[in-house]
């Protein structure tokens, strides 16, 4: 019988973008718990990134942080300079594209600058991060991108945001076909309404209860709910899954209840 105490990612390396808080932090912590050396990318909140690394190390894991603002000129160069320094010549095994800009509002209020900005962070950055990672990504590696149920639920205030997530889902299955020859799996995980310490909107009166009422499993998600799915896809257990979009939303907006 399999020993479930054996870490499934021992000897592996991982990069998680946007890992200083929220879902990204949960993913980084879970991958580290499973044995991986995790690169914690962050855009600006150095204190949160340090806290994430400290919590991982206190739990017996290994991690290091990298600061790089995504969506600007030279972002990928800065990110990979830090990554390659931290890996010290080791290849990369797992890439998790989690970092994303916030929804930009309804179409009537979206400026060209805001539109370009969210596509630069949510689409351009992951695309070129993957491109840059491919030479150091080990054959048999994993690419996992975090999407959103906004791609299957019409939310007028999130039009441009939903468009970016739709682009990521298309990217996932096309890259899965292209990279299968290297035994690299490429999958996308859709998150739903997820509560964490920075989810201020959900603390507004009535919002949390409404979202719970629309979710089949009757509660909000947590970062660990998404992290567990990512950990499965990153492990050898997920070796035969590629080109897929996994909805990890607890069944939000499946229909009338």
Image (tube, helix red, strand yellow):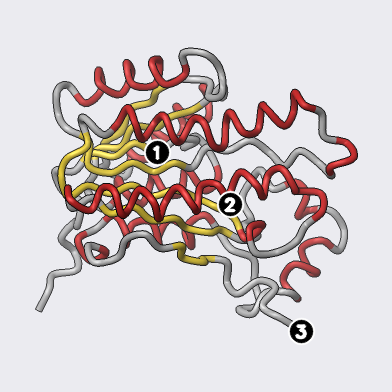
| Residue highlighted by disc 1 | 16
Q: Residue at x 26, y 36 (%)?
A: 62
Give neighbour class at mark 3: few <14, some 14-19, many 20+ (Cα, 10 Å): few
Disc number for residue 256: 3
Foreground of the two, 143 or 68:
143
Secondary structure at badge 3 equals: loop
Give the image quarter of residue 37: top left
Quadrant where the C terminus sits is bottom right
| Residue highlighted by disc 2 | 166
Foreground of the two, 226 or 182:
182
Q: Earlier in the sequence, mark 3 or mark 2?
A: 2
**Image check: 178 left or right of 147?**
left
Q: Residue at x 14, y 29 (%)?
A: 90
Give the image quarter of residue 195: bottom right
Q: Position of residue 175 (x, y in %)?
A: 35, 48
Query: Disc 3 vs disc 2: which is toward the camera?
Result: 2
**Image check: 48 left or right of 96?**
right
Secondary structure at badge 2 equals: helix
**Label 3 with label 1: CB-CB less than 8 Å:** no
């Amino acid at each position: 019988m399999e020993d479930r105490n054996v870490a499934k990612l021992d000897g592996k390396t991982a990069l998680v973008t946007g890992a200083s808080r929220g879902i990204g932090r949960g993913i980084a912590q879970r991958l580290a718990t499973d044995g991986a050396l995790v690169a914690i990318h962050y855009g600006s909140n150095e204190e949160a990134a340090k806290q994430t690394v400290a919590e991982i190390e206190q739990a017996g894991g290994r991690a290091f942080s990298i600061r790089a603002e995504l969506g600007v000129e030279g972002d990928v160069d800065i990110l990979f300079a830090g990554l390659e320094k931290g890996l010290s010549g080791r290849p990369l095994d797992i890439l998790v594209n989690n970092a994303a800009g916030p929804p930009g509002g309804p179409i009537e209020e979206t400026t060209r600058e805001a539109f370009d900005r969210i596509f630069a962070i949510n689409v351009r950055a992951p695309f070129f991060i993957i491109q840059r990672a491919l030479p150091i990504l080990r054959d048999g590696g994993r690419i996992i991108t975090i999407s959103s149920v906004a791609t299957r639920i019409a939310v007028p205030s999130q039009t441009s945001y939903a468009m970016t997530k739709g682009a990521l889902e298309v990217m996932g299955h096309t890259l899965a076909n292209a990279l299968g020859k290297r035994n690299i799996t490429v999958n996308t995980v859709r998150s739903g309404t997820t509560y964490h310490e920075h989810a201020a909107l959900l603390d507004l009166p009535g919002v949390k209860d409404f979202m719970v009422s629309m979710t089949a499993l009757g509660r909000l998600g947590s970062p660990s709910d998404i992290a567990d799915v990512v950990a499965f896809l990153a492990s050898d257990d997920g070796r035969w899954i590629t080109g897929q979009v996994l909805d990890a939303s607890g069944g939000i907006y499946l229909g009338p209840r």
